[in-house]
Amino acid sequence: MFEKILIANRGEIALRVIRAAREMGIKTVAVHSTADADAMHVRMADESVCIGPPASSESYLSIPSIIAACEVTGAQAIHPGYGFLSENANFVQIVEDHGLTFIGPSAEHIRIMGDKITAKDTMKALGVPCVPGSEGGIATLKQAQALCADIGFPIIVKATAGGGGRGMKVAQNAAELEKAFLTARSEAKAAFGNDEVYIEKYLTTPRHIEIQVFGDGKGRAVHLGERDCSLQRRHQKVLEEAPGPCITAEERARIGKICADACANIQYRGAGTIEFLYEKGDFFFIEMNTRLQVEHPVTEAIFGVDLVQEQIRVAEGLPMSFTQDDLIINGHAIEVRINAEKLPDFAPRPGRITQFHAPGGLGVRMDSALYDGYKIPPYYDSLIAKLIVHGKDRHSALQRLARALGELIVDGVDTTVPLFHALLQEEDIQSGNYNIHWLEHWLETHLRD
Ligand code: ADP
């Protein structure tokens, strides 16, 4: 059993990992930049180490500083959280070369899934359904034209090295193809230093459905159903729920088994998410995230499991604490992401919290690193809290969400809370009738001053 682990992250996710470790009797080490000296994760961990100045590139992304912090404190393993170094195969390699344990998948699996063409090829070979499109990269406009004549418009050009919604361009017809192809390539080059792109059929009204998977690294793997993350702004998730309002038990069992079998086949270790677009009863793989997701708590709520403790268990070489048959869905859960941003344009609003009160009561979970008087630094992500509610069904989860949002007090900065109050009034949200474009359309018509 690990005696001490280091958390290479900050904010709510660092707290999340500290809580899981403490319940397991494992000591924790927080790392922080000079801007985060007063942060909650530093206060809550057993020990802390300052690893550099505010810029992430010199602190939370500094591999030598993090390894040194492990050596100084005697931490045996590193939990990366999400973002920062969590999907950096090179980091995993260095961690292992230093005789430390990375709480997550192998460097090889992170590398495969980090390259979208390799990821798609791998999944296809494992029997996972993919969006129709090019086999590998598309090097010339001529090749692109020939492929599109074959699969038909609309299409989307995507960067092989893509992430964060960048380097993607849609073409509605042949006339738009040249521009989409060339701009996607130059954006990809600028953002990722790699201009390779590929082409997929563009789905016009899909939902974003992702399957939570978990493997022990030795060939056993399970799925924990789906999350519907279709409410997105600029490809960023805003609200997530589980189970998906439109997914049947048969569909879940079928796609879940395909995903679990794929993970078992490659001996995947730890938590992972296989993301799909879902349209008219069909699932189309888009990418796999080889880490814990921001929205993992909705899955924890409906299955009654602790995914972080499970990650720690399998990193130690222990078996998973559940089998597929143990995983039975109980009720419905919804998460909203509360950001320090000002509507209607979602401009970041860091600053001092003058008053904070977290909602509570049955079925309410608040994952946040806020406290009264905390000063949100301007250097990092604007996510300040995740409010997760769990109810016996979707309707009661929605009612509970409205009740909990009403109790929440965050004074001193602007937040996205008013957006959720407004969304809860919408008939489409109440009935679960939305796709990946719904929120953008709604924002255009409702949030103009
Ligand atoms: P990234 O890694 O940059 O987030 P993804 O491949 O996960 O890129 O796609 C992000 C989002 O872009 C999806 O959730 C979806 O909204 C949209 N998207 C991606 N591929 C397609 C497609 N083939 N058809 C329609 N929308 C797509």
Image (spheres, rainbow, N blue to C red):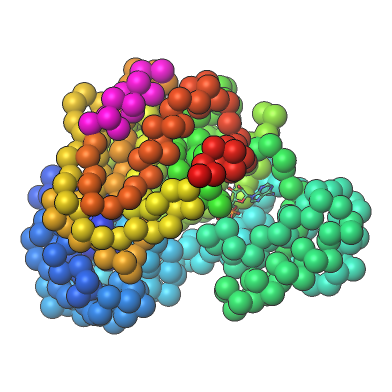
The spot of residue 349 in percent (x, y) is 34, 58
Residue in the picture at 72% in, 40% down: 204
Q: Quadrant of the N terminus?
A: bottom left
Query: Residue 254's image quarter?
Result: top right
The spot of residue 3 in percent (x, y) is 12, 59
Whether residue 436 sits left or right of residue 369 in the image: it is right
**Chief SS of the magenta region:** helix
Residues shaded magenta: 395-407
Residue in the picture at 57% in, 74% down: 192
Query: Residue 183's image quarter?
Result: bottom right
In the orientation shown, which residue stands out farthest toward the front?
449
Residue in the picture at 43% in, 57% down: 347
Whether residue 219 sits left or right of residue 186 in the image: it is left
* Visible residue check, residue 134: yes
The question of residue 114 being in magenta is answered with no
Pick whichever, 414 or 169, lies toward us. Answer: 414
